[in-house]
Image (spheres, helix red, strand yellow):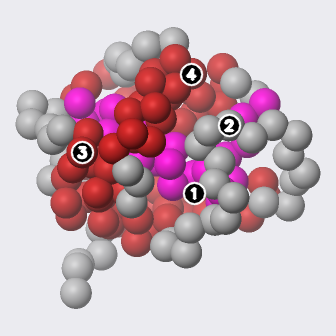
Amino acid sequence: MQQSNPILLTISNILDEIIKETDTLEIEYNSIFHANKAPSITIYNYLQRIAKYTHCSEQCFVIALIYLDRLQEKHTYLVLNSHCIHRFLLMSIMTAIKFQDDDYYKNEYYAKVGGVNLKEINVLEQEFLEYMDYQLFVDDQQYAIYEKKLQEFGEIEMP
């Protein structure tokens, strides 16, 4: 059994709280990230799966959270709910890995890890980058703010 990861648990707890609220809303706009049916895998288990198979740094998860916040700020009509959070997570983490880490895989591998096909992941990646206006750099100050908030929320120590 995989060991519990405090940062993944904290991020999943934050996202679970958001999803509880947004799942009750009636949504007028569905993006290509929205599935007809919410995946059965929990956010925490999905994050653990991504961490296990991508071997990415923990910083990528913090950056991915920053990307999700930026996405919500730029596109207020996009509602992160149980029908899209997994795809947005996959894209934000995959993008953070490619931007932050020295080693990364081909999209075909990320598609298998994330449970989507290659064509879909390529379309999702392009759409995600456009939503982000290709603004992927996270400065040290913003990263430190998010890291501190995660530590406070989950009472965890970052490496």
Residue placed under numbered mark 2 in the picture: 31
Q: Residues within 10 Å of mark 1 (few under 14, many from 20)?
A: some
Kindly give the residue lying farthest to the front in the view shown. 119
Specify which label sits upstream in the sequence, 2 or 1.
1
Q: Are marks 3 and 4 in contact (CB under 8 Å)?
A: no
Q: Which callout, 2 or 3, points to the residue nearer the camera?
A: 3
Residue indicated by mark 3: 108
Residue indicated by mark 1: 14
Instruction: Decide if residue 53 is on the left or right side of residue 95.
Output: left
CA gap, disc 3 and disc 1: 29 Å
Q: State the separation of the CA atoms marked 4 and 2.
A: 11 Å
Residue under the image location 54 percent in, 36 percent down: 68
**Which residue is disc 4 drawn over?**
131
- Picture quarter with the N terminus: bottom left
Closer mark to the observer between disc 2 and disc 1: 2
Residue 156 in view of the camera: no
Mark found first going from the N terminus, 3 or 4: 3
Q: CA distance from mark 4 to mark 1?
A: 22 Å
The residues bearing labels 2 and 1 have C-alpha atoms spaced at a distance of: 22 Å
The answer to which quarter of the image holds residue 20 is bottom right
Q: Mark 4, mark 2: which one is toward the viewer? A: 2
Q: Nearer the viewer, residue 140 or 129?
A: 129
- Determine the residue positioned at 66% across, 31% down: 72
Provide the secondary structure element on which disc 4 rests: helix
Mark 4 or mark 2, earlier in chain:
2
Q: Secondary structure at mark 3?
A: helix
Q: Position of residue 29 (x, y in %)?
A: 81, 37
Horizontal side of 121 relative to 75 (left or right) equals left
Taking the image as shown, residue 18 lies to the left or right of residue 69, namely right
Q: Residue 91 lies in magenta, yes or no?
A: yes
Q: x%, y% of residue 50? A: 30, 58
Residue 82, by quadrant, is: bottom right
